Image (cartoon, grey):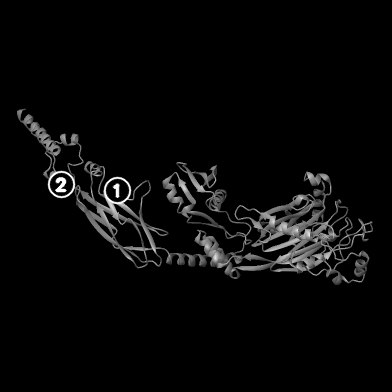
Amino acid sequence: MFGCEYLTKRSSTATVRLRLQGERTPELLLELQDDIHTQSFLQHVTKAKQQGDTPAQDAATNIKPHFLFINYSNHLFTRVTNTQIYSAVCRYRFQSVDRSSSWSDSPSNYTMRQAMMSSHTGSREGLLKYRLNKKEKEYVDIKNFRFFIGTWNVNGQSPDSSLETWLCCDPHPPDVYALGFQELDLSTEAFFYMDSSKEQLWVDAVERSLHPKARYIQIRIIRLVGMMLVVYVNKEHKHHIREVASESVGTGLMNKMGNKGGVAVRFVFHNTSFCFVNSHLAAHVDDYERRNQDYKDICARMSFHLLEYPPLSIVKHDVVIWLGDLNYRLCLPDAGEVKRLIDDKELRRLQECDQLNIQRKTKRAFTDFMEGEINFIPTYKYDAKSDRWDSSGKCRVPAWCDRILWRGSSVKQLHYRSHMKLKTSDHKPVSSLFSIGVKMVIEQRYKKVFEEIVRDMDRMENDFLPSLSLTRREFTFENVKFRQLQRQSFLITNDGQVHCTFAFIPKLNDSQYCKPWLRAEPSEGVLDPNETMEIFLEVYVSKDSVTLLNSGEDKIEDILVLHLDRGKDYFITVTGNYLPSCFGTSLETLCRMKKPIPLRMILHSVCFDSKFILVCFIAHFAYMKEIVSQLLM
């Protein structure tokens, strides 16, 4: 393979060095437009280098990725210092079509016009993805997996008991755990130095309490001050998890600090993309608009950057699960009344006053998200280490601050509950168990559909490729003479379905499309479908080309390359014999001739002048002198 690196970068162009590994190990300098096409090109070069000429089998899907090399649009290359390689590079675009690629940027979100535009700009991949998505049901099966989602505001406390009543509350082990914590650490060190001694304490407590009927591995952990999100997956599924990434957004002090905000982890499981967001939104009863703004800021600023894809936002995933201390309260100022309604089990009446429900209904926040029915009492606020409602002087009104919401298809909530036995914090932990349908590509069926689509696309492309028919491709010019024009012609016909732009182009290492004694007229043009044009080939030996022909360094032999824009090349051979002339032959050569100048060389010349007559006389005199000297011996 080869490596690449930026050398210089100006406002609109970037110079890139490609180092090829081979017998001659050449270097190629390319001056590329500094835009998204160049970035895509370099990314695919890097991937090709990493994976080698034969990509390894993808363990996550048991599908061998394919790398199709398709035409790069010529406008990408501004200047290339090696013409020979430029001709090759301009004809190929390194475009990865990986059958195990993420479905997060699902083509179903595209319109047909967008896919066609993508294809028009040189990306066949866009149209391919669109058509694969249209036939997804033919090669994709949906299998349900169990996802356990948990959230807990631990109020800066350390774990003081087992978490099994929270994490092992079901007889069957989940396939995936996603656990979010808030206020993990309230210390100054956690706020200013991003360091926390309590992170590992809680991670250890979690790992000791995961379901004993399965073995789990941690695939990602991320923390921002007191917010932490950790994701575990059943070990038997680890090869089906890929493209893992995490990000954080602070919305606290100055709308930047991490005392409030969100952390997120995303990945692809089989062929379904997931995003888990753990957030801690603005506090205080009346600040619901600030909470709405925190939600919008997290959505706008949270972006995952993967090498293979453009930046992915939260909503660009098949399934999004949002959890955390969202801090939405009840629009009831009287704590006594709220507690009475709780005792009377009038939870639905209370939920009518829930700020989050109101904001969702008025489409001010979490508009596209769903939440299951809440059948548990509010999880905030309790006296620490007890089940008593807040008895401090503030006597805060109970509320459902800790929530779990989701968006996406094939998501079914099995349980939504709080866990009252855990009394470490002033919040109670909340969990939700989901059964989520995951897309599983069946390789055999995928291969069949993929190949059918590619064949169909190839057939369509071939039908609309420009094409010519030529009446002749071989030409022979007999007895070519100095300054005597010979012409032959042939017809070209556009036998395709689209207009055809043609031109005679130079061969590799040549600056002109033909030798100096040859010319094609016209040398370029455009033909409409079924239109015919006559091309003349003219052979004319002038004083600029006669010398090489007389000396035998050149011959009446050439190959013309007739190139079609977006089409193939046609090769036309020109041969013939040249009758040497005294014109274009040096005086030294003429004087050294041991035989008289053949009459045909004189007759082949168009005109006679004093220099020519003098040369002939000298040549004949030298020849006669040689004969006399031989007779006297």
Where is residue 77 drawn, in percent x and y? 48, 50
Residue 331, labelled with which disc? none
**Looking at the picture, which amino acid does disc 2 mark?**
His
Q: Residue at x 27, y 55 (%)?
A: 537
Question: Which residue matches tag 2?
Answer: 604
Few, some or many residues within 10 Å of mark 2 (<14, 14–19, 20+): some
Question: Height in image: 624 above or below 164?
Answer: above
512 vs 163, nearest the viewer:
512
Q: Which mark is residue 515?
A: 1
> In the image, what residue occupies the spot 80% across and 49% down?
199
Residue 145 visible in the picture: no
**Disc 1 or 2, which lies upstream in sequence?**
1
From the viewer's perspective, is 300 left or right of 111? Answer: right
As drawn, the residue found furthest toward the left would be 632
Residue 8 location (% of width, % of height):
54, 42
Q: Is residue 40 left or right of residue 592?
A: right
- Name the secondary structure under disc 2: helix
Quarter containing the C terminus: top left
Residue 53 lies, in percent from the top left, at 52, 51
CA neighbours of label 1 inside 10 A, class few (<14), some (14 to 19), many (20+): some
Query: Is 19 positioned to the left or the right of 268 in the image?
Result: left
Tags 1 and 2 touching, CB below 8 Å: no
